[in-house]
Amino acid sequence: MTQKKKSTVAFSPERRSILKLGALSCAAGAAGGSLLGLNHLFQPSEAQAFEVPALPEDPFIFTTCVNNCGNTCVLKAFVRNDKVIRVETDDSVEDDWENGVFQVRACPRGRSMRRHMYSPDRLKTPLKRIGKRGEGKFEPVSWDEALDIVAASLKHCVKNYGNASVYSHYASGVITGPMTRRENFWRLMNCLGGFSLGYSDYSSAQNQAGLRYLYGKAGYSGNAISDIAHTKLAVFFGANLSETRSSGGGLQYEILEAKKKGNTRIIIIDPRYTDTCVTVADEWIPIRPGTDAALASALAYVLITEEMIDREYLDTHCVGFDASTLPEDAPEHSSYSDYILGTGFDMVAKTPEWAAAISGVPAARIYKLAREIGQTKPCYIMQGWGIQRQAAGEMNVMAVAALANLTGNVGIRGGNNGDLDAYHQSKTPRLPVGNNGVKTRFPVFMWLKAVENGKNMTADQDGIIGGDRYPADIKFIWNYAGNTIINQHSEIAETERVLSDETKCEMIVVMDTHMTATAKWADIVLPSCMYPEQTDIVGPSYAMNTDWALLTEAVKPFFESRPVYDVCVDLARRLGVEKEFTEGRDREEWIEYLYQTGTRKTFPEMPATVAEARKAGVHFRAKSRDFPVPFADFRQDPVTHPLKTPSGKVELYSAALRTLSRKRKVDSSVLGDVIPFVPQYVATWDGCEDMQTKEKYPLQLIGFHYKGRTHSHYANVDWLLEVLPQTMWINPVDAERRGIRHNDPVRVFNDRGEVRIRAKVTPRIIPGVVAMGQGAWYKPLSADSKVDVGGCINTLTKYRPTAIGKANPQHTNLVQVDRI
Ligand SMILES: Nc1nc2c(c(=O)[nH]1)N[C@H]1C(S)=C(S)[C@@H](COP(=O)(O)OP(=O)(O)OC[C@H]3O[C@@H](n4cnc5c(=O)[nH]c(N)nc54)[C@H](O)[C@@H]3O)O[C@H]1N2
Ligand SMILES: Nc1nc2c(c(=O)[nH]1)N[C@H]1C(S)=C(S)[C@@H](COP(=O)(O)OP(=O)(O)OC[C@H]3O[C@@H](n4cnc5c(=O)[nH]c(N)nc54)[C@H](O)[C@@H]3O)O[C@H]1N2
Ligand code: SF4
Ligand SMILES: [Mo]
């Protein structure tokens, strides 16, 4: 069903709609709007051209918001003189949830895209560093000069240090669209023999690592959220989908509809009373960060001792629930139930009373929750990624998933295996990248170690895959559409220390739209087009269970900004691989090629040419809300359909983890640096049981993904900051002790740094814990200061990869807070 492209001009103020939406959730209907003054633009004289009132006859183009929030909302950008003068969201279909056709309505971030496009931080020209690295001093240079420098450095690094010394860093700023994603540079480097790439990501690395041991599948493995319609009880651990999947056509909308249909009770376990608690929860169970495995273990204790487990399923589908299914060579008393019942290595029964002391959840509530879970068939047990961004996150992930196995909820409609929604991505084509000659990869969070001493990294110790040892130190970093060098990576002061040594990494190239904290550390900065300034093929991102496709149109690029494909062509020419890179196609010809060979294979009913598809607007296709149930075949017959674990079964006892624990040296002086073989609670450094650190820094600090930004993207939008300012959540009990009142300026600090920020005093957070939305722009008081006035939590996080997945524990921190 292709929609007719039509203009609906509404006159309510764009800004007012954003302020209103920002305060609430975004599942509400499309709100249009004309434009309002309040200018805060890059140059007052230049700005005028971008601030003209929209008129009913102004045409619009379809574009999207492509940031990494897991959605991709369709935007209508009203255009005059090649400038975007108003932004509205898609309203081209009526909502029909059951058939999977509904508006992919933008949240306030997408709707304020124009304020981001034309903000004072927008890059206009290529820049070359003139000061010390990181000092932020640059001079404008021509594209030719900038690309000559980049090409010369690439040649030098490949020749002298090998292809593996060139690294394309993790970057999620552009998440859909073949011509706009990171693959452009990958294709270029593969024409030259290859390059370094990390594996896994900052989102769910512990989830992926833990579930690979348990299920043989690395995450993205749960029943669809819409399955809630088929159960009476859903329990979410550390998932805040109203905020993190906030498209009007995203998972938050699906939960609302499914809950209504199934009349489902939803319980949310989170240290904060989140927006998801506000919008869909029947009950909030507050918990101390990092202790979900303790709670889950106590729930298991009640389920086992009160005989609410699915014994038959455990015997036939799982390894190591008890001695009867332990592998022969496993140590005695090493089964999961040994750990739970107090006959395991620590001889402690994991009773609700035991867990209450750790997690802060009252024992009576744990008994009740276990009975609710045990007596509801099916039960949808699900985890977000908040519980895994912790110092022993893999264990939290596995312990929650274990509950789904104890109760036999895996592989059935309305149940779930304990993971987050598997997602059902539509097939937006990708630019083919060719063959990467560098086969060895490191866990992405370990990139800084690869800069400092890549050649010392090994498979056993550092999680290298595709080889035993890393072949190079990183000498060249290409960073396109990412801010994870500084702003989004842990422990900024540590990153700065490593990168300030120019004999280590010799060249940092940042291609971005804005002067970010990462761009300030670049040697060469390249100004990139934003999405409304380049055409592409788009579709739903990874957390949208819909089928649609759109061929976007574009306005003229902002100043000298350029699309990444064109930049890579220019580099390919300088490096002697232009023909291989382009295959004779320019950007538009690639779009036509990918449309014909990709999009039209998925949607044969779409128009014959790109030109016609652009005119037609958004193409939707119906999709049932009853998605295939993951692991259903395994559930029916585990012998014919084994899992990809070594045993083919769910490994509650993991022989592979035992092998890893023998090979990998851990630091026994660090609390929580252990590799257990069954899902269990691990007390960790900077956790609620790290009594030594707590003497100095008594409060746990967690981050969360905030509705005012997508990570650091949109963080500078004045309208969003007005309604969603950066604050630190603190419970009234903790605030009062420190003489802190609501909105007071405070300093939050530990040995790693200090953040100055305003306090949000609220009972929506458990005592003993403070929280800060992650992604605010890092603004140090001076170049060598550890004091940040931008509210960036990575001033305070620690660069200590987890023991199993070598992943980012960015929600595990201890701090002290003082009133300023
Ligand atoms: N403490 C803490 N740190 C975290 C997290 C946390 O929970 N706590 N979360 C982690 C997670 S899950 C993730 S995914 C990462 C995300 O970290 P990043 O992938 O770095 O995501 P963003 O901060 O959104 O950065 C995206 C960049 O893309 C740029 N950009 C946007 N549009 C365009 C475009 O069209 N072209 C180009 N060239 N650039 C564009 C933006 O300006 C921005 O600089 O952060 C991680 N960091
Ligand atoms: N608005 C917005 N949406 C986003 C993003 C964004 O930056 N902004 N980022 C996107 C990306 S790339 C990702 S990876 C996802 C991230 O999605 P998630 O990782 O699921 O998001 P978080 O907010 O880090 O964590 C979810 C919840 O876990 C809670 N939490 C933290 N620690 C614990 C704990 O130990 N136990 C329990 N039970 N709860 C805990 C937090 O308070 C939070 O409410 O979101 C995506 N969506
Ligand atoms: S940030 Fe996400 S939910 Fe908001 S408009 Fe963009 S894609 Fe949609
Ligand atoms: Mo993420």
Image: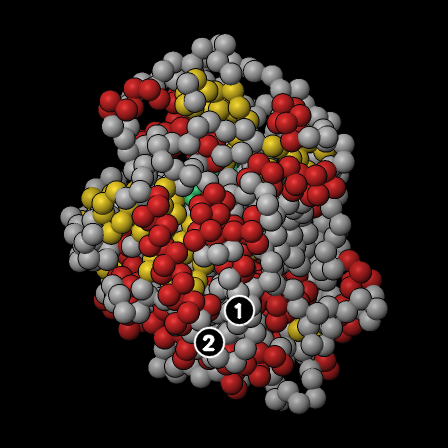
Q: Which residue is mark 1?
A: 438
Quadrant occupied by the N terminus? top right
The residue lying at 33 percent from left, 54 percent from top is 149
The residue lying at 60 percent from left, 58 percent from top is 434
Q: Distance of mark 2 from mark 1, alpha carbons?
A: 9 Å
- Disc assigned to residue 204: none
Identify whether 431 is placed above or below 103.
below
How far across and how far down the image is residue 414, in percent? 72, 49
Q: Residues within 10 Å of mark 1 (few under 14, many from 20)?
A: some
Q: Which residue is mark 2?
A: 471
Please, what is the three-letter code of the amino acid marked with disc 1? Val
Please, what is the three-letter code of the amino acid marked with disc 2? Pro
How far across and how far down the image is residue 335, in percent? 63, 80
Identify whether 636 is placed above or below 774.
below
In depth, the one of 77 and 744 nearer the eye is 77
Disc 1: residue Cβ within 8 A of ligand 1's nearest atom = no
Q: Residue 203: tell me if it is visible.
A: no
Q: In the figure, is residue 558 to the left or right of 277?
A: left
Q: In the figure, is residue 701 to the left or right of 642?
A: left
The residue lying at 34 percent from left, 57 percent from top is 508
Q: Residue 574: tell me if it is visible.
A: yes
Q: Quadrant of residue 323?
A: bottom right
In depth, the one of 389 and 345 nearer the eye is 389
Q: Quadrant of residue 490?
A: bottom left
How far across and how far down the image is residue 814, in percent? 31, 62
Q: Do the residues bearing badges 2 and 1 touch, measured as CB atoms within 8 Å?
A: yes
